[in-house]
Amino acid sequence: MSTFITKLTPPPNATGPRVAIKDLLDWKGTPTTAGCKAVADSAQAATEDAACLRHIRQLADDNRLRIVGKTNLHELAFGATGVNPWFGTPPNPRARHTIPGGSSSGSAAAVGNDDADVALGSDTGGSVRIPSACCGTTGLKTTWGRVSLDGVWPLSTSLDTIGPMARDVAGVVLGMQLLEPGFAVDPITPSRIGRVRGIQGVDPRIDEAIDDALRRAEFEVVDVELPGWQDAEQAGVSLMFTEALAQDGGLDRQRIGDDVNAFLDMGRQFDVTDATHAARRTQGAWQAELAATFADHDVDLLALPTLRTFPPDVDHAADVLGAILTMAINVAGVPALAMPVTTTDRTQPVPPSLQLVGPANSEERLLAAGRRVEAAT
């Protein structure tokens, strides 16, 4: 098992938070492997930092922040289990027999195991939120386009985002401040939440825990349904698989794991032009539906589970694919916060994960709501 692909030792006089970086982002002086042997075997040390790491570099150079390493991930960021055939599978801090989730598996494990205070991950179809849910930690998918992707190995540029991960909301706030100097949580806490209903296959214990968390946080809760959800998910699959094939299809397939090879082959099943046009039409309709939901129900945020079920064990890792409730949010391009909530079921080592979703560029509002939930639960 391996949380890090590259461990880094901060200078002995360095202070400040410990930061881990997903090995998908360029960090000057270290190679970027994307968790893939086909990339790692010829990877050279990066000559520049990814654009989103510029402030972090300044703080590190001033010894006010400690970079502890580049974290492991599901290969090419193309998967939800976190199982990596080349660099090992990061240990889940809550339950070693359980998957860490992907693709930002090492980032979730690093903060969950207290190897880092903040970790950076990428989220294309849920890759910050899924491992946060699997590891009982907190992660923020940012608004598409808010954080620069320059210097980040792409998976699907129509959906890719960068976001912070931590043990709690305070750590995620710190992560946003590292990505975006001057970031501040909204001083006015949201009060009216749209609780998304009608989702099939959700474990009733998870639904109960989320409803209890919203009640204890004393939100005004309004039930809403999102009929365009499944179409949005399918549009996301079309965009991700066709764009991932265009990006990574030319790599040496002998040095790519079986599951990612299978995903790349699935990308060949789409007619790129037709699939992209259809996905864009669905994306526009879905974004309009979400905007109307916020406006018509006069809600600040939406609430739903991050996963339908509790995370599976490693021997049944692929079961997580049917549990994901994250892709449609990437298609909308809006931000979402995944955070653990308490449950009365003590048989589960990993707590249920609440997913809060806001309009575009509402990260400040989301984290204010997250603080309120965390304080109440």
Image: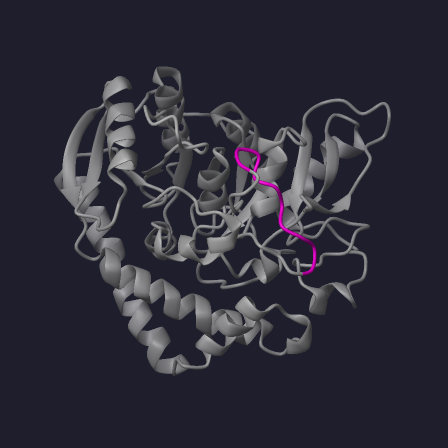
Instruction: From the top left corner, tell me how far across and down residue 272 is, in percent.
Output: 41, 80
Q: Quadrant of the C terminus?
A: top left
Task: Give the farthest residue toward the right.
Answer: 12
- Tell which of 356 and 308 is nearer to you: 308
Q: Is residue 236 magenta?
A: no
Q: Is residue 278 visible?
A: yes
What span is colored magenta in the figure?
86-95
Q: How is the image coloured?
A: one colour
- Tell which of 111 and 159 is nearer to you: 111
- Tell which of 317 and 17 is nearer to you: 317
Instruction: From the top left corner, tell me how far across and down residue 21 is, in percent.
Output: 66, 43
Q: Is residue 141 visible?
A: no
Q: Is residue 92 magenta?
A: yes
Instruction: From the top left corner, tell me how far across and down residue 362 is, in percent.
Output: 37, 37
Q: Is residue 270 above or below residue 32?
A: below
Q: Residue at x 23, y 47 (%)?
A: 291
**Along the horizontal axis of the image, is 247 left or right of 377?**
right
Task: Tell how many labels.
Answer: 0
- Tell which of 361 and 374 is nearer to you: 374
**Along the horizontal axis of the image, is 317 left or right of 17?**
left
Q: Residue at x 35, y 51 (%)?
A: 323
Q: Main secondary structure of the magenta part?
A: loop
Q: Residue at x 27, y 42 (%)?
A: 203
Name the image quarter holding residue 363.
top left
Q: Residue at x 52, y 31 (%)?
A: 172
Instruction: From the top left corner, tell me how far across and down residue 218 is, in percent.
Output: 24, 18
Name the image quarter holding residue 253.
bottom right
**Along the horizontal axis of the image, is 13 left or right of 320?**
right
Q: Is residue 184 above or below residue 319?
A: above
